[in-house]
């Protein structure tokens, strides 16, 4: 995603302008494919000759393919452009118990998938991960792989790329990227899972035109990805968004981060299991998926545990609503399968946090099962695609405002 730097403004060189235009066209093709060059020129506001020049380059680079698909009533047959779905990435969603690895094409269509057990030993996990990545790539000799993306249940230091904060994983500071790059020969992009889910909403979901959005991922812990003014908020050292570790009660239960009573010890999957164990003589080793199945079968105690979890998720969201006033809160997590029951519990809490006006929309992600992996595809591809569609919208808004200002002065 293009970042705007207000303190170190550069005059755009013709090369910068070309890069921006390239990103704009690539994103328009991604969103509206198949699309003709004429429609690209209309949608982007760029001249036909510029569009032709850039699309030829994209075809040479094999990002885009050109196909004869249409026929006008008379005259020339227009050709339509679409992304080259032979270009692919390998993505992995690293979670404390299980890591899911998948092959996806540039349109985030998933072609193969595999799960491995995440181990307490990071080096052993990396060895298994490398074997799984290589195995999946071998299944697809027809594809050209662009890189590897990893979504983390925590944070990596942006300068050193070492994992520095992942309390639920139980790993000490660890360099995940170097061994993966050495073993696969590809560039590895890593990002926080909640931030990846923001990218999934903005790239592939319905949030293209939303300006202020917060994604809350609920799993073994709680993560948040913050999107303000069409930009992902990274914060100092890139670790903004740890609302999950804000204590709601300093006397509360111990959290994996070392503090007590953090939001996630009340609202995570682990918390729901704890509530269930407090009320039912459940067998040890009951997992969250088991709890969901019990609830889906109508088990009253399982449902009550999930109701309490939802209530706590909503309680923590009050910090987000009061502090950031997002237009939309998107929720990612297995529990959203029971959204008709649990969604209203969360919404009622959120509504209480509103100081003025309407509460934000709270909804499950477009594809909650795949959100983390889809976002990780965007994490890898964003450096090739540059300016996003929302940047373009912003540019349009700005030029409309400038136009109005001129008319006013005029
Ligand atoms: Zn904590």
Image: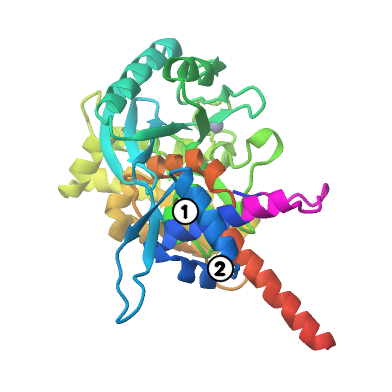
Query: Which residue is label 1 attached to?
Result: 203
Q: Quadrant of residue 183?
A: top left
Left or right, residue 127 beside residue 197: left
Disc 2 + disc 1, Cβ < 8 Å: no
Range shown magenta: 3-20
Q: Main secondary structure of the magenta part?
A: loop
> Would you call the spot at circle 2 few (<14 residues within 10 Å), some (14-19), or many (20 or more)?
some
In the displayed structure, would residue 286 be above or below residue 68? above
In the displayed structure, would residue 396 be above or below residue 16? below
CA separation in Å, label 2 and label 1: 26 Å
In the displayed structure, would residue 185 be above or below residue 366? above
At mark 1, the secondary structure is helix
Instruction: Say whether disc 2 or disc 1 marks the residue closer to the N-terminus.
Output: 2
> Would you call the spot at circle 1 few (<14 residues within 10 Å), some (14-19), or many (20 or more)?
many
Ligand 1 - quadrant of the structure image: top right
- What residue appears at the point 61 percent right and 59 percent down from the top-left corner? 391
- What residue appears at the point 60 percent right and 67 percent down from the top-left corner? 46
């Amino acid at each position: 995603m293009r970042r705007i730097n207000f303190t170190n403004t550069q005059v755009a060189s013709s090369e910068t302008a070309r890069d921006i235009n390239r990103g704009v066209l690539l994103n328009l093709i991604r969103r509206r494919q198949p699309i003709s060059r004429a429609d690209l020129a209309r949608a982007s506001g760029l001249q036909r000759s510029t569009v032709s020049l850039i699309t030829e380059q994209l075809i040479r680079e094999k990002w885009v393919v050109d196909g004869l698909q249409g026929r006008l009533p008379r005259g020339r047959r227009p050709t339509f452009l679409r992304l080259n779905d032979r270009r692919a990435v390998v993505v992995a969603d690293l979670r404390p118990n299980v890591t899911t690895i998948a092959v996806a094409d540039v349109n985030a269509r998933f072609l193969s998938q595999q799960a491995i057990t995440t181990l307490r030993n990071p080096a052993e996990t990396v060895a298994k991960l490398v074997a799984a990545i290589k195995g999946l790539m071998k299944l697809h000799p027809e594809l050209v792989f662009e890189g590897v993306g990893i979504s983390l249940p925590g944070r990596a230091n942006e300068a050193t790329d070492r994992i520095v904060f992942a309390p639920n994983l139980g790993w000490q500071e660890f360099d995940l990227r170097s061994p993966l790059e050495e073993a696969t020969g590809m560039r590895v992009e890593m990002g926080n899972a909640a931030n990846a889910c923001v990218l999934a909403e903005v790239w592939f979901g319905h949030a293209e035109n939303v300006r202020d959005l917060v994604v809350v991922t609920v799993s073994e812990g709680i993560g948040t990805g913050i999107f303000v003014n069409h930009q992902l908020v990274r914060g100092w050292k890139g670790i903004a968004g740890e609302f999950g570790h804000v204590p709601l009660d300093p006397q509360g239960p111990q959290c994996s981060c070392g503090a007590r009573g953090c939001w996630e010890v009340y609202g995570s999957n682990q918390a729901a299991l704890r509530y269930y164990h407090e009320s039912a003589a459940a067998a040890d080793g009951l997992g969250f998926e088991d709890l969901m199945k019990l609830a889906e079968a109508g088990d009253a105690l399982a449902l009550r545990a999930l109701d309490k979890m939802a209530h706590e998720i909503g309680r923590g969201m009050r910090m987000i609503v009061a502090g950031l006033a997002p237009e939309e809160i998107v929720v990612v997590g297995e529990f959203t399968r029971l959204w008709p029951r649990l969604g209203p519990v969360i919404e009622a809490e959120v509504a209480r946090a509103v100081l003025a006006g309407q509460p934000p929309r709270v909804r499950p992600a477009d594809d909650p099962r795949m959100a983390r992996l889809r976002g990780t595809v965007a994490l890898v591809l964003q450096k090739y695609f540059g300016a996003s569609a929302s940047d373009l919208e912003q540019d349009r808004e700005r030029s409309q405002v400038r136009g109005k200002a001129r008319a006013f002065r005029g």
